[in-house]
Amino acid sequence: MIHIAIPAMDEPDLPRLLLDLNAQRLLPQSVCVCINQPSSYYTDGLPEHRRICEVNQSVYRQLRRLESEGRFAFPLEIIDCFSPEKAWDAKHSGVGRARKTAMDFLSRRFGKEASALLVCMDADTRYPPDYLQNVRRQFVLYPEAVALANPYYHFVDVEDRPAACAMLHYEVYMRAYALCLRLCKLPYAFTAIGSSMACRMETYRKIGGITPFKSGEDFYFLQKMNKTGAVLTHSLSVSHPSARLSHRVGFGTGPALQKGLDNHWESYPIYPFYLFETMRAAYAGLPILFEKGLPCREMAYWNRSFGEGWWIPIKKNSGNRPGQFVHACIEKFDALRGFQFLKASYRQSDKGDFANLSDLYGRLRKTLGRINNREDFSISASGQDSSAFFEAGYTDSLFKNPAKAALSDLTLQDWMQIRDFLFLCERHLQKNQALLPSW
């Protein structure tokens, strides 16, 4: 059984998403939508907030009308967290709370179902007709998996070149980050996208649900899942998140695009590969730390972050079991700590990012050879097929071109080629290791 949770604020496309779900080859058992907004939007006098109030009210009326006409092939639950008497206070609002509200509702109602799956979607994300079918397929193939970070691919509007370049830059940042983690065989090698997550209902209940952060709730949720069990990163179906500008969350795609258009990429660098190798060496040094109490030099950041002798209480609590000690240390230096280490160790620059991206490209070519698998690139949706942009050998000449010395030198076509190459490399690695080990 599949149950879908959808947070929604200022989502005029929500009715279309729900109608599109009728075409899924595997229909959901139920869908829960949480339409939400801060209560202050009704009284603060800001035109943009008034517009959001009107959009939420209009979408709610449309959904109720479609529901009364029997237009949905599944039961629909709409949670009203937007009307004047039910909207949230600003302190306790946001996408994290909305996602949690919908997920918790489904967990309470259907949590005792055997093999029930909880799937997260967003109104502005497109899903191919076999999406839910393949989500279920992966959990059947991998019964030890507790969650899925589904593969993703943004379609861009090539007519709006600045926005398209910003979107592709951000996606390259995300893919480079994930690929470096995978090449170094590091834990937590997932990309967290809220609209492309799924998990077992029983595990959701076991960990106490998703934490309602205002943004980044998807990252912390998958990190928590990865500490609980194995996380899937491969599916035959690819989701297509929106590439629109948005100020609804503190960080994520929308804010990243706005920063990119303003040429502020400080928060989204292409990290040098040697930093990931440093993390790998630190993890590899944990058994010796257990045996001899000697942290390796690559643990310098761990010592600064946790304090000298941070491992001593962990060892005492491990019952003299090295495996449990290593596991506990990896849980302590988790995805967030790894991200903080990278941020603290590298200062972003246009030329430095290009050099790091070029280095990663060379490593991928050496490790994986020529990637040009059209089966991996069967990602068409909504009448679009970006595979027409990918040309074997284009990226080879691009990174050898002396006129290209910084990311700002890249054209829209360059960005498309790089993104598509990284996408294919990631798909290849995901196929070969669909399941990330639990830590």
Image (tube, grey):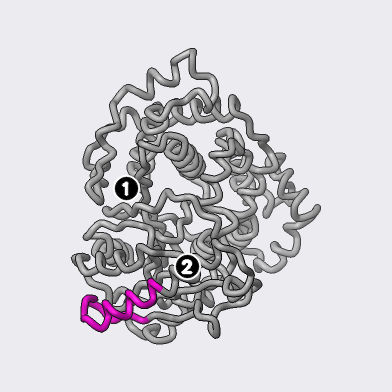
Residue at 48% from the left image edge and 56% from the top image edge: 192
Residues drawn in magenta: 58-77
Q: CA distance from mark 2 to mark 1?
A: 35 Å
Quick check: 185 left or right of 153?
Answer: right
- Find disc 1 in the rendering and name its residue: 431
Residue 327 bears which disc, if any? none
- Find disc 2 in the rendering and name its residue: 9
Residue 74 falls inside the magenta stretch = yes
Q: Give amino acid for label 2.
A: Met
Up-down relation of residue 325 to residue 88 (above or below) = above
**Could you say where residue 423 lies in the image, as x and y percent from the top left?**
37, 40
Residue extending furthest right?
308
Residue at 70% from the left image edge and 63% from the top image edge: 314
Q: Give amino acid for label 1.
A: Lys
| Element carrying mark 1 | helix
**Could you say where residue 229 lies in the image, as x and y percent from the top left?**
46, 65
Q: Depth check: 149 or 131 in front?
A: 131
